[in-house]
Image: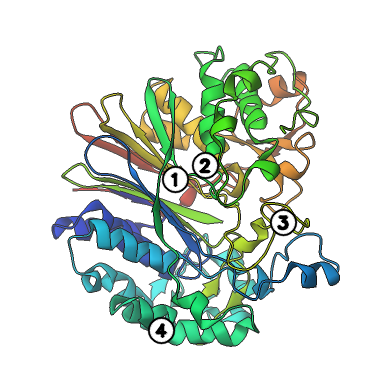
Amino acid sequence: MVCTVDHLASGAGVAMLERGGSAADAAVAANAVLAVTSPHLCGLGGDLFALVHDGTGAPAALNASGRSGSGADPERLRAEGHDRMPHHHDIRSVPVPGCADGWLALHGRYGRLPLTQVLAPAIGHARDGFPASPLMVPGLATVGPLCEDFATARSAGDLIRRPGVARALEALADGRDGFYLGEFGKGLLAIGGGEYTEDDLAAGNAEWVDPLRVRAFGHDVWTMPPNSQGYLLLLALGIAEGLDLPADPADPLWAHLLVEAARMAGHDRLDVLFEGASVDAVLDSADARRALIDPSARATVRDLAADGDTTYLCAVDGDGMGVSLIQSNASGFGSLIFEPSTGINLHNRGIGFSLVPGHPAEYGPRRRPPHTLVPALVTRPDGSLRSVVGTMGGDAQPQVLLQVLTRLLVHNRTPGEAVGAPRWRLAGQGTGFDTWRAPDQVVVEVEEGGPWSEGLRERGHPVGAMPYGSSFGHAHLIDVLPSGVLAGAADPRSIIGAAAGL
């Protein structure tokens, strides 16, 4: 089974499984199609994280997030008056993209089919064209003038061709250097203005790392270590497990307790999260943070400080291998900078860097920024695979997953029920990446259909209302039932997403 935000991508993944490919082949094929058809969510100009379960025990964890260039200069940005990294139209917020390195690492370790075959569906869509999705259309007016690939598309269904992306994928199929040191890499150096060197592009961005784990609700939940914010999901689950959650998720107390678990987990994220950070002590603080939660009232967290748009996909093959993969441009179409030769839009993941002098996440040469991407994978106590799950949603990713996993593991909801149910999220000042700058000012935005608003207000939460599907992520989930049967769901908020299998 394969679950993605786009039926074209899900179909490509299933095609690999039909040909005897692994879940890794399916995941790479699906992600490559998304890199063509969903540039508003992901692409070759972005980063990638993945978890792979192949049998029993701990999953393998892949960090394919890129590093800033050797020319990164925080003093220059501060001298220009910046106190935060530029959000759009500035190459300095564009680390070297790690996506292609991630595909190569994942395929190289777990793939069964030739890479040329795995990338063939994406190359075909890029060369021959694909219909513009309803989710992409709102952004086309902005990016049309920036890249000729989108200049003539106006409505859902309009045909879009991306010949430069097809060439980049063909070059990658022949080897890493064809992409990073070929047409795309040369174009990146040209527009970098000294931000990058050829050595920056020659250096690999993918590495296998040790995953993080927490035991919660009778299962082991796994995710990525820093520079990912995945620890927030595990910490919130650890806090929530010790709370007296109502039996019915429709009870406002259910939302209040999970909101508080998320706030207690995340209020100090800006101080805690950086490349190479150890979060063991933070994860061990679940009991202390839980003790500060009042079931009847919202807590104030500003004095408690201790001394991330995206696409997610998942795949499970007939041999039981599960892949949980998340890939992103950061904000929508990313930096709104396009490599001019291939038309690949570049992410703006560098917005995660700090410009505070001496901060452990300070922008500087060859550094990875803090990342919002949170793939997740669940195993049973015997080490067997239970679920692969993840979501888009910037800072809100751990909050969405907290709700989905609680519904799945505590309330025994089906994947469709767990993924499709209304959600809440904590909202900052508007970018989707600023939640924790003022944790006591965040608003609890409740999705249309969520029954918790009045009860949250009574407990002191500022509450906002949002339409269903507007800002609450696209979560996808495959659950391996005890019988071995797969049950999966693609998020209905994605409109054209699909859970497809054999």
Q: Which label was assigned to residue 375?
A: 1
Residue 179 coordinates in the image, percent (x, y): 40, 79
Point out the tag, 1 or 3, that comes first from the N-terminus: 3
Q: CA distance from mark 1 to mark 2?
A: 7 Å
Q: Which label was assigned to residue 354?
A: 3
Residue 158 coordinates in the image, percent (x, y): 46, 74
The residue beneath circle 2 is 230
Point out the tag, 3 or 2, that comes first from the N-terminus: 2
Task: Give whichever of 464, 324 is nearer the camera.
Answer: 324
Q: Quadrant of residue 279?
A: top right
Q: Which amino acid, mark 2? A: Gly
Can you tell which of label 1 and label 2 is closer to the viewer? 2
* Residue 413 in view (yes/no): no
Badge 1 crowding class, 10 Å Cα cut-off, few under 14, some 14 to 19, many 20 or more, is many
Residue 189 placement, left or right of 300: left
Count of labels shown?
4
21 relative to 198, above or below: above
Mark 1 secondary-structure assignment: loop
Q: CA distance from mark 2 to mark 4?
A: 36 Å
Mark 2 secondary-structure assignment: loop
Point out the tag, 4 or 1, that comes first from the N-terminus: 4
Residue 67 placement, left or right of 214: right
Q: Which label was assigned to residue 163?
A: 4
